[in-house]
Amino acid sequence: MNSLRSLKEQFVREGILIAFNGAFTHNIIEEIGNAAKRHMEHRQLTRNIITDVFAVYIEQTQNVRNYMLRQGLGGGVYDSAIVIISSNAEQYFVASGNPVRQADKAELQERLDFLNRQDKDALKQLYKQQLRKPKDDSALGAGLGLIDMARRSCGPLSYSFEELDDSFVFFTLNVTIAEA
Amino acid sequence: MLCIPATISSPEVSFDQDTSCLALKGESYPENSFEFFAPLFSWLESDLPRLKKLRLEINIPYMNSSSTKCILDIFDLLAEHAGQGNEVTICWYYEEGNDRALELANEFSEDLPLPFETIPFRNEEG
């Protein structure tokens, strides 16, 4: 096993508050989210920052979990994902990483680029429009998660895709939250 | 009879027959929001038509985006009911300082043709 000490040092260096790697179940999402919330309350952060970090964390992890369920990726090598909440002096970061089908990459990238071009007012209108759309019966969510994250994020949603194999890419999404 | 107890990630849902008050209380980010709210939609479908008066009290400090969608659908049903000559009011409780809960309430009320009151309260525990 590699040095736990060096892993710990990396955590400290990067300001990592909480990290989870594995299959996201609803219970795990609840437990980690509430632990992170208590930790932030302990740091005496403002109510708005705590809510925004928690909200982005919930949207990210539920998006990942819903994607895995919809794609039938449970129980395999592709159902393992990672989520990390970290901070520096001024900002909080909520990042998630999970395998995404090559076939879904282009649409996701297009969606993120589109959201990144919108200002806060436009995002609010998009959110309202999406809220008014009838629910897609096959979907587990309401298609609002990314818009909600973009609204709470300071600056664009940062993301990357790394090749895993012929069928999958590793998708990383990193949302920055700061006091408005 | 409508009474769903709260969990960590889902609100308590209850209806008081005597006061005709429907109350939702607690955070809302269930595993599947549509499944969670389904019994409430069934209840609204069967019981709302006979209610001349309804007061909806919401005290949800945080809700995820799919819960937001469900709540909007509930508001739409209530607006339709009010449009048929019934009395419907919405009271949105939020803890003082919880700006996000108040912002969400304001966004909801912007497009809603219903009496909508936002009521701050102090956190007694903290």
Image (cartoon, helix red, strand yellow):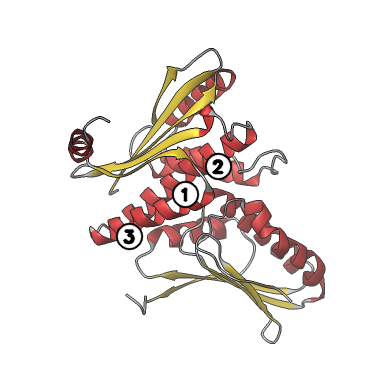
- Label 1 to label 2: alpha-carbon separation: 18 Å
The chain to which mark 1 is attached is: A
Relative to residue B121, is residue B90 drawn left or right?
Answer: right
Earlier sequence position, callout 3 versus callout 2: 3
- Residue B72: where, in percent of width, then height? 62, 56
Look at 63% across and 43% down and name the residue there: A140
Numbered disc 3: secondary structure: helix
Look at 52% across and 44% down and name the residue there: A62
The chain to which mark 2 is attached is: A
Task: Let me know if marks 1 and 3 both belong to one chain.
Answer: yes
Task: Identify residue for label 1.
Answer: A29
Query: Which quadrant does the N terminus of chain A fall into?
Result: top left
Quarter holding residue A155: top left
Nearer to us: label 1 or label 2: 1
Amino acid type shown at disc 2: Leu
Task: Identify residue for label 2.
Answer: A144
Does B6 appear above or below A34? below
* The furthest residue to the top: A166
Earlier sequence position, callout 1 versus callout 2: 1
Q: Is residue A3 visible?
A: yes
The chain to which mark 3 is attached is: A
Does A61 appear above or below B104? above
Relative to residue B96, is residue A165 drawn left or right?
Answer: right
Earlier sequence position, callout 1 versus callout 3: 1
- Observer-nearest of A99 and B26: A99
Numbered disc 2: secondary structure: loop
Q: Badge 3, how many Cα within 10 Å: few under 14, some, many 20+?
A: few
Amino acid type shown at disc 3: Arg
Amino acid type shown at disc 1: Ile
Q: Is residue A92 visible?
A: no
